[in-house]
Image (cartoon, grey):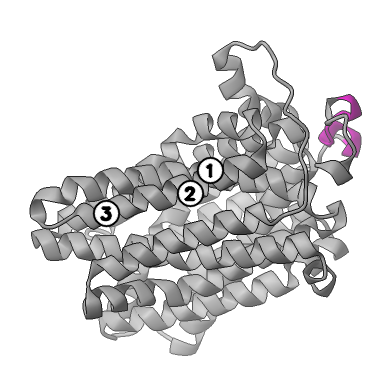
Amino acid sequence: MHRLLRHRDARIYIAGQSLSIIGDSALWLAMGIWVKILTGSNSAAGLTFLAFICGYFAAPVSGAVADRFRRRPLLIAANLGTAAMVGTLLLVAGRGQVWLIYLVMLGYGMSASLITSAQTALLPGLVPADLLGDANSALQMAQQGLHVISPLLGAGLLAAVGARPVILLDAGTFVVAALSVLALRTREPRPERRAEDWRAQFSAGIRHIARTPALRRPMIAGVIAVTAFGFFETVPFAVVAQGLHRTPEFLGVLISLQGAGGLAGGAVAAAVMRRSNERALVVGGLAACAGAALLLITASLPLVLAACAALGVCIVWINVGIITLIQLHTPGPLVGRVDAALNFAIVVPQAASIALGAALIAAVDYRILLVAMAAVIAASAVYLGTGRDRGAAAAAPPADSMPRESAGTL
């Protein structure tokens, strides 16, 4: 990590993106609370998050756009465009403009999908290959750590001085993120334009995953895991109330511990990858997640606290391992579409899992759900850990499919 932070472009990029995370996390929670204040409806507030998630369904288009244009100017334009879009929330004056909040949150999800794919594609040209794991770990550490503070910041600002400061804060962080990308010295070659059918362009990412063993098996394992992972959005409320017999506010303590676990997991993720490999890191994260689900069954406060910290570790390990695998096993012109394809393949079952968990928690004992979650996630870890690739040559992209310019110019 010390070597990474000595790298000028990496240092600027990570600092800019970390600041942007503060605004992102502050906004999405504050908007849900704001809709609740304006309408008095829990359902209306919940639709705010649904609109944001639905924006991610544009991932196939986002990936194609990220691969069609230079990623650096695209990120600058996307961040500035998102800042302007968020600024339109200043027009909301009452209940009659709630539709504008939904519309902006839908666009916010679409923008997040595009920015994520472009970032994943830009990073391999920003740092040496042996520092990709460290860079991904640093970004995940920032994301998990700041997610502990920034939602509380957004809710606090909303309660104290209203929505306007939260909106301005988020718009400002997107401007800073754009400026950080503008300050990078990296230069990209012009993307090669191929005469392809639009369906071929949009499906190129998933087709690459399907024919690349190093990516295919992790994607299948990830899809298996997220069919149960969404339950974590609702089960913790039951753990706090029925298991620990605490008030709902105690959930904030568990979330803080998860953030602390994410920081610890990010600090060691790159070292674990160097001692083993990226897929082993993902397997370890899935196994830790299954174990954490079982610990949450107990009514023991120390064990539940340990489980929440383990969840933070496993989320970071899974994300870092999969993102690094994509960057190492995908030709540069395809990285955006591969990242988008993986996100789309995971977001759809995860959204269904969240909805199913919300329905089941009212009828099924939460401990039964935790056992089922542990079993499904453990099965995904076993599937990923026991499979064998057909050798490194089969997993790596062919040399002639890589950009012809040297890596230092990307």
Task: Bin the neighbour count of mark 2 within 10 Å (Cα to Cα): few under 14, some 14-19, many 20 and up.
Answer: many
Q: Amino acid at mark 1?
A: Ala
* Residue 144 spot, x, y in % from top left: 54, 69
Front position in the image: 386 or 405: 405
* Residue 42 spot, x, y in % from top left: 16, 60
Q: Is residue 71 above or below residue 321?
A: above
Check disc 3 and report the residue beneath it: 89
Check disc 1 and report the residue beneath it: 77
User: Is residue 164 in the magenta section?
Assistant: no
Give the quadrant of residue 282: bottom right
Q: Is residue 176 left or right of residue 235?
A: right
Disc 3/disc 2 C-alpha distance (Å)? 15 Å
Check disc 2 and report the residue beneath it: 80
Disc 2 to disc 1: CB gap under 8 Å: yes
**Which residue corresponds to the image point at 66% horizontal and 72% vertical from the top-left?**
265
Give the quadrant of residue 206: top right
Q: Main secondary structure of the magenta part?
A: helix
